[in-house]
Image (cartoon, rainbow, N blue to C red):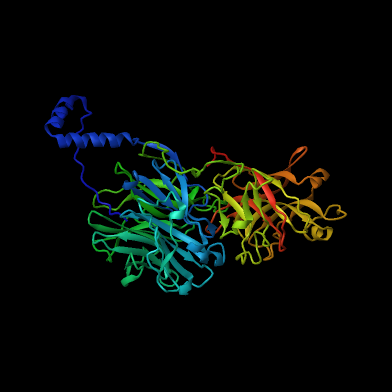
Amino acid sequence: MQRMRSNRQHTCNCLVSTAFATCTQMLFNFPSLWLTAVLRLATASDHVHSKAYHNPVLPGFHPDPSCTRVPEWDNTFFCATSSFNAVPGVPVFASKDLQNFRQIGNVITRESQLPGIANTNGATSGIWAPSVRYHNGTFWVVTTLVYDHLPQNDPARWDNVGHSDSVIGQANSPCYRSIIQVIFKSTNPFDSSSWSDALHFTFEGYDTSPFWDDDGKTYIVGSHAWQVRPMIQGFEIDPDSAGIIGDIHDMWPGTGGIAPEAPHLFTKDDWYYLMIAEGGTGLNHMVTYARSRSMWGQYDPDPANPVLTNANTTQYFQTVGHADIFNDTAGNWWAVALSTRSGPEYTYYPMGRETVLTPAEWKEGQFPTFTPVRGQETGPLPAQNKQIGGNGNWAGQDDFLNFPPGSSLPVHFVHNRFPDPSAYTVSPPGHLNTLCLTPSVLNLTSTDARTAVTPQTFVGRRQEHVEFVFTVRLSFASQQDGAEAGATVFLNQGQHFDLGVVTLTPQSAAEAGYTGKPANASARYIRLRTITASSSDQGASDPLSKPDIFLLEPSLQRSSNLQLQIEAVNRTTYAFRYETAGGWATVGFGNSSQVSGGFVGTIVGLFATGNGANVSDPAYFSNFSYKGNHAVF
């Protein structure tokens, strides 16, 4: 982390008309003062005094944000967020103005980088809390691969990971580290392939974050497994061998809230500042601060703690915490944090934990202060500037994809764990402008709703809007019993809504819940399957939610081509439809509380499966359209 120091500013306000002549004379008599004034006026012109903006700035499943400004990269802000089991993992965003964030890539794009993601168990496992920093021409992302089903006192639970653009060493340990450096002149975060395979270091904890002190040494701060012993800890590492140097130091246990975690270490005005989260990632989430004159303490808490929280309020934005702080070129301070658009009832929040931005103030010699997080904020934002390279989506952008020949999946599309690359083909011969999916044996629930021994055929994008309309055209002609393809609202393997076209024998249809007039032979059905936490392990519908299944009309039995639609009608309700000759027909509805909870957020996407059998007939998707209601927050 670059050291952050404040300097007293001595300015001559030459904008006061009565003093203009005097100030002008001073500027010409003192050239250095003139140059300083010109530079400050130029900086001021790049910022507005106060401008309104809306949260979240990274909408949808983007928790545990970390951001840093990099002067060497034209003062671009770079941000990264947690991805858990989603692959590609650790999305990276860039912004020039803190208003427009473009996804420029992902850190984890190759299975060789971190093969352990394939073996995670449960939706709360996977990649937790990346910290992004820049040091001496190198971008660092330090994070943790967590096997959340293991006990907190099991060292194998924590696989601490960092990344650099070249592999610089490997430690032989069940808990290990990686560093991905992005060499400034050769590789960069705009090129996802530049991120290296993982190096590993031994630390029985999570939420690790790097720090560089004036002594030139590299340090890591992290959260010890809090259920074993709540403590923020720190240690020195060798940046070349990835080994820990010396002792692991206890730094601060927090103020007494559960789960002291998410530490970031800064220096300013000859103080070391620890910024952490406490209270757990739910309604009691909060940000607290402490400081010390020496790195290893004693750390004294801010008397104003918690410095940022929406706990015990009626605000729509709840669970505010897990923050990071940085400044802009004008010296204004900003914080990012996670938050849920849930209200205090904490029931309907399918998008999960999202990234919000709030102004901060950090006066010399004092603790920083923060503006409470709200949906509409004002602050001294930089002037609007969308000069960001790459062709990735802007945060909150709609989609219309026709999968042209020669294209690849968009950078913001994700799978559940590492996919089978052969199951996805863009614009294959004879089916131009389609995405061809080969069905997987496993459906989206898999065998136990927690693991997947073989990849699932699934790809989608994050739900970013409270209200949206998603449509896609499907061509799927398989006559094999159980073959299914369609669209889904997917939170995790144990919580998802699947709108699929499925081929079933009369017996299979009856077993699936079809109660209408039976077909004479195998036939195609439209089915809405609701999988929630109370569903069976084998992927049967939630017994509390009757499956919606209908025999397709004769015209759709003969044609393999139809259009599917999912609409988030409001914050509580999804509607699932398919197109008929007479217009859209509603198959059923879903309650958004059934896809809320945990650490992740919903993904709207496509799937194809044999529901336990091998199916070779491909599904072809086209006209992928996602349109959010940008007026509703």
Residue 312: tell me if it is visible: no
In the image, farthest residue toward the left: 29
Q: Position of residue 382 (x, y in %)?
A: 36, 39
Q: Is residue 20 above or below residue 214?
A: above
Q: Position of residue 187 (x, y in %)?
A: 40, 52
Q: Nearer the viewer, residue 175 or 73?
A: 73
Quadrant position of residue 543: bottom right
Q: Position of residue 249 (x, y in %)?
A: 32, 70
Q: Position of residue 364 (x, y in %)?
A: 24, 49
Horizontally, residue 153 falls left or right of residue 263, namely right
What residue sits 35% from the left and 60% below the top?
210
In the image, farthest residue toward the front: 429
Q: Nearer the viewer, residue 268 or 299?
A: 268
Q: Nearer the viewer, residue 627 or 227?
A: 627
Q: Is residue 533 above or below residue 203?
A: above
Horizontally, residue 490 falls left or right of residue 499, namely left
Quadrant position of residue 514: bottom right
The number of numbered discs placed on residues in the rendered structure image is 0
What residue sits 52% from the left and 72% below the top?
150
Residue 4: tell me if it is visible: yes
Quadrant of the snapshot with the N terminus: bottom left
